[in-house]
Image (tube, rainbow, N blue to C red):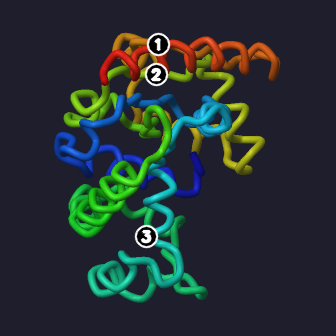
């Protein structure tokens, strides 16, 4: 997840009601993990093996990019100060606002939720793989997502590893990363919600790929049995 858009994951996670008929036709995995855990790396490994990905973070970015579907309503609601020079959302300014103002968060979610829902449903409907992986950073925090997935896959690593990765990747201070982590479910809560866990701490690329390979074979079998 892009830490500069950390706020997006909350409304991406809860934007959807329980899955519709299009999603029910395909075996669904909900992939989640804390910031800096390596969700994107793991998701890409599954995609390379043929799984279909629906990434709520990418959708949230897309609708707030220049000419994004959410941008007219965001500018009207929050003002031009929240629009960057290129026409995209000023993510840093918005993040600072909604971290301290719950009403602003709700107003933002009222704009983004319907758009994320529509885009997620469209992508799931168009998915061609043997199963679909929904990449949802705040899946555990959502009231809806777990019910929409056949299994929950957690990418796990120690909190100190998360902090070090995000500080290096994004140039954030330790305090900034800790503030983001504090708004997410605890590591213990994620693990308690998991059906499957991929460990991504000091794991080598080969060891990480081996974990993905094993789960991919299980998910292929589960998907075949569902149909």
Q: Residue under label 3, please give it.
A: 63
Dividing the image into 4 quarters, which one contains the C terminus?
Answer: top left
* Marks 3 & 2, CB-CB < 8 Å contact: no
Image location (x, y in percent) of residue 216: 57, 20
**Left or right of 217: which side holds 105?**
left
**Which residue lies at the image location 43% right of the left edge and 70% below the top edge?**
63
Along the polypeptide, which appears first: circle 1 or circle 2?
A: 2
Decide which of 184, 42 is in the foreground and name it.
42
Q: CA distance from mark 1 to mark 2?
A: 5 Å
**Which residue lies at the image location 40% right of the left edge and 16% below the top edge?**
222
Look at the numbered disc 1 and give the secondary structure of its residue: strand
Decide which of 9, 115 is in the foreground and name it.
115
Along the polypeptide, which appears first: circle 1 or circle 3?
A: 3
Look at the numbered disc 3 and give the secondary structure of its residue: helix
Image location (x, y in percent) of residue 199: 62, 14
Image location (x, y in percent) of residue 38: 64, 32
* Marks 1 & 2, CB-CB < 8 Å contact: yes
Q: Residue under label 1, please give it.
A: 196
Look at the numbered disc 2 and give the secondary structure of its residue: strand
């Amino acid at each position: 997840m892009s830490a500069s858009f950390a706020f997006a994951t909350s409304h991406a996670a809860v934007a959807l009601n329980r899955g519709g008929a299009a999603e029910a036709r395909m075996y669904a995995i909900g992939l989640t993990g804390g910031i800096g855990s390596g969700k994107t790396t793991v998701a890409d490994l599954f995609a390379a093996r043929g799984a279909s990905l629906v990434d709520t973070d990418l959708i949230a970015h897309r609708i707030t990019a220049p000419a994004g579907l959410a941008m007219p309503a965001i500018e009207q609601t929050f003002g031009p100060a929240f629009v960057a020079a290129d026409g995209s959302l000023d993510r840093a300014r918005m993040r600072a606002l909604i971290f301290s103002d719950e009403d602003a968060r709700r107003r933002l979610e009222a704009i983004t939720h319907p758009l994320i829902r529509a885009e997620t449903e469209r992508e799931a409907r168009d998915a061609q793989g043997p199963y679909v992986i929904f990449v949802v950073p705040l899946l555990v925090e959502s009231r809806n997502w777990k019910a929409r997935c056949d299994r929950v896959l957690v990418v796990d690593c120690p909190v100190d590893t998360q902090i070090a990765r995000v500080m290096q990747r994004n140039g954030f201070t330790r305090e900034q990363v800790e503030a983001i982590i504090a708004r997410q479910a605890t590591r213990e809560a994620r693990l308690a919600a998991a059906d499957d866990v991929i460990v991504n701490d000091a794991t080598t690329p080969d060891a990480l790929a081996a974990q993905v390979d094993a789960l991919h074979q299980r998910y292929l079998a589960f998907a075949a049995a569902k149909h």
